[in-house]
Amino acid sequence: MHDEPLLEVRNLTVNLLTAKSAVRPVDGVSYSVRQGECLAIVGESGSGKTVMNFAPLGLMPTGVTTMLSGSVKLEGRELIGLPEAEIQKLRGKSVGFIFQDPMSALNPVRRIGRQIAEMAELHLDVTPRAAEARALELVKLVGISDPVARLRQYPHELSGGLRQRIVIAIALAGEPKLLIADEPTTALDVTVQAQILRLLKDVQRRLNMAMVLITHDMGVVAGAADNIVVMYAARAAECGPVDKVLVSPRHPYTQGLINAIPRREDPIGSEFRGLPGIPPTLGAPIKGCALAPRCELAVPACSNSRPPLVRSDDSAVLVACPVVNQGKAAA
Amino acid sequence: MIHFISKRLKHSLVLLFMASLVCFTLVVSAPGNVAVLIAELRGAVATPGYVEQVAEEIGLHKPLLMRYVDWLGDAVRGDFGISYRTGTNVSADLANRMFVTGTLIAGSAVIATLISLALGFLGAFWPYKLPDRVSRGLALLGASTPTFFVGALMIYAFSVTFQLLPSFGFNGPKSWILPWLTVAVLPAAVLSRVVRVGLEEAMTSPFVLTAKSKGLGRTAILFREALPNITPLFINALGTQVGLMTATAIIVEPLFAWQGLGDYFLAGVRFRDFMVVQACLLIFLTFFIVVNLIVDLAVLLTDPRIRRQWS
Ligand SMILES: Nc1ncnc2c1ncn2[C@@H]1O[C@H](COP(=O)(O)OP(=O)(O)OP(=O)(O)O)[C@@H](O)[C@H]1O
Ligand code: SF4
Ligand SMILES: [Mg+2]
């Protein structure tokens, strides 16, 4: 069954209940990732990218009640409805995670070597000594110089880039099949961002893992991903192969995103070309298209019913906008 | 690191010096003529001539600075002079009494640590559930019950009703248990909250999400990730509580008829025996300063971030 995706998400909806609020940060989203593939998920801050990937694996902060519906299959196994004890076994072992802020992702009072070796002990069933050796291997793999000394250090003794390499080493330690990287370069210096991205891409290819790469950065998408899902207000607006979506974006929101990327020929100080307006709040589910108030192409019908994500004129690209889809079809 | 330690040692020495000034001032400004007190103590009729002779002997006529230097020199060598009341050498009494109070504080500190860790973990493991509520209730009770009352309850329960443990005296471990428990109740209550709140806060840190993403379970995260993070905080709070135990000893030692420093100090105050009060006070203050020094060094050992600041 080589054709079966490693991760297959169908119609995933996430409701979050806290003492103060109820929100639906993910509303009927579908996508899939195959072994060896990299899927980019882009979208504005608050569009639900993190929740969508973390909630099904039980990684929500305490104090939030998470309600999931739809289907999330990892290697054919349904995660929704699986008891937490079973999901815990998958974390680290089948899925490795990389976080946005390497400054706070590591425990400040534990040695780096321990924080990596612990993973090997937990998932690879090896002796503590072998786990230490594995930690050393991993630190070398993620391209850290003077690895022996690094293992004995504490997180605050390392730079942000080095710490993110350590976080990557931890994520790789359990030999997972899927890597979920949540804005892995956002918190880093610009010069370091490219290095970390190259490293991620490199290990993903070498270890033939699947990777979900959450990002704001279209440059990152172009350089690293095979496929892309564009999120807007808890829903997928468009998805398809990166080379197609970036070159000829169809959905008005995707067009806006790509249009907003500064170009070289822009005069210095020229106006920012973002979409006008602000994204909606996620309190109540939106009846029509979430983009309607900000969309230039909007017609009255847009506010009536939610546009489904369907094949566009290119069958590899799915777009949730009837106006665009019909326009193309008619043309 | 060496820099930190030497700086911290200097700091402690300055504090010790200030403590000695306080103690010296206390005796100098004591009401009544010391020479008369001593003369009477020696059983002689306090004729002006004899009083004058005593004053000469103990150096009352020397300038204040000289007297301070003399006194400090003696104190450093462990000579705290003669008790006005009993005429015995204060230092001879001190050795025994320091052992008694040391036993009290050391045992209570260990018990308070164990109880507070147990209660705090119980609460952090089942937050807002029954174990947490019980632990919180016990902490509230322990922190709001006066120590002498706790002691009386202990005696009533364990000595009078069940006759399990002796209610007084310092005769081996069995007789130590009730005083230990009595002194430990308040610090255990306070520290259990430090543990509980510290753990809860640590459990909301971003690195706990990382730990969870590694596949660690809640117990492992509490012990491996959260506990090392609250250790410096706990050591600090424990240090404060151990320092305060000297004050509790003053209440608890007489209650159990222990002849420790607290009991000695209380008697000294009651009979205006300033040499005794002064010696006890100096020991208490020194203890405070040393405990704080140890706390700072221990925090340095348990928190690599602070270690780095000073390296
Ligand atoms: N712990 C939480 N408690 C309550 N609501 C939450 C929580 N986490 C997320 N949300 C809600 O879910 C929405 C989506 O959050 P999410 O973190 O997935 O966005 P994101 O797309 O990852 O944004 P960013 O790019 O800023 O990381 C938020 O707008 C917020 O309303
Ligand atoms: S459905 Fe309507 S509002 Fe939504 S993107 Fe398409 S045109 Fe714009
Ligand atoms: Mg996010």
Image (cartoon, coloured by chain):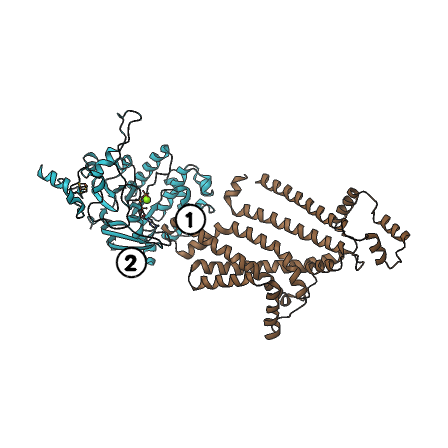
Chain colours: A cyan, B brown
Tell me the quadrant of ligand 2: top left
Q: Could you say which is closer to the camera, residue B122 or residue A260?
A: A260
Q: In which quadrant of the rendered image does the C terminus of chain B lie?
A: top right
SS of the residue at dot 1?
loop
Residue A260 image-quadrant placement: top left
The reply to the same-chain question for discs 2 and 1 is no
State the residue position of label 2: A82
Q: For mark 2, does the 10 Å Cα neighbourhood hold few (<14), some (14 to 19), or many (20 or more) residues?
A: few
* B96 left or right, relative to B53: left
In percent of width and height, residue B298 lies at 56, 48
Q: Which residue is mark 1?
A: B205
Q: Is residue A242 visible?
A: no
Which residue is painted at 40% across and 56% down in the image?
A: B218
Q: Position of residue A76 (x, y in %)?
A: 23, 53
Query: In 3D space, how far apart are the residues under numbered discs 2 and 1 (Cα atoms)?
Result: 26 Å
Q: Position of residue A176 (x, y in %)?
A: 32, 48
User: Residue A205: x, y in percent?
Assistant: 28, 40
Q: Is residue A294 above or below residue A122?
A: above
- Left or right, B240 with reference to B258: left
Q: In the shown orientation, is residue B207 left or right of residue A305?
A: right
Comparing labels 2 and 1, the label whose residue is closer to the camera: 1
The vertical placement of B131 against A40, above or below, is below
Camera-side residue of A20 and B58? A20
The answer to which quarter of the image holds residue A269 is top left
Chain under callout 2 = A
The amino acid type, in three-letter code, at marker 2 is Leu
For the N terminus of chain B, give its image quadrant: top right
Which residue does the image show at 71% across and 46% down from the upper left? B21
Residue shown at 39% from the left, 46% from the top:
A134
**Any part of residue B46 in sight:** yes
Chain of the residue that carries numbered disc 1 in the rendered image: B
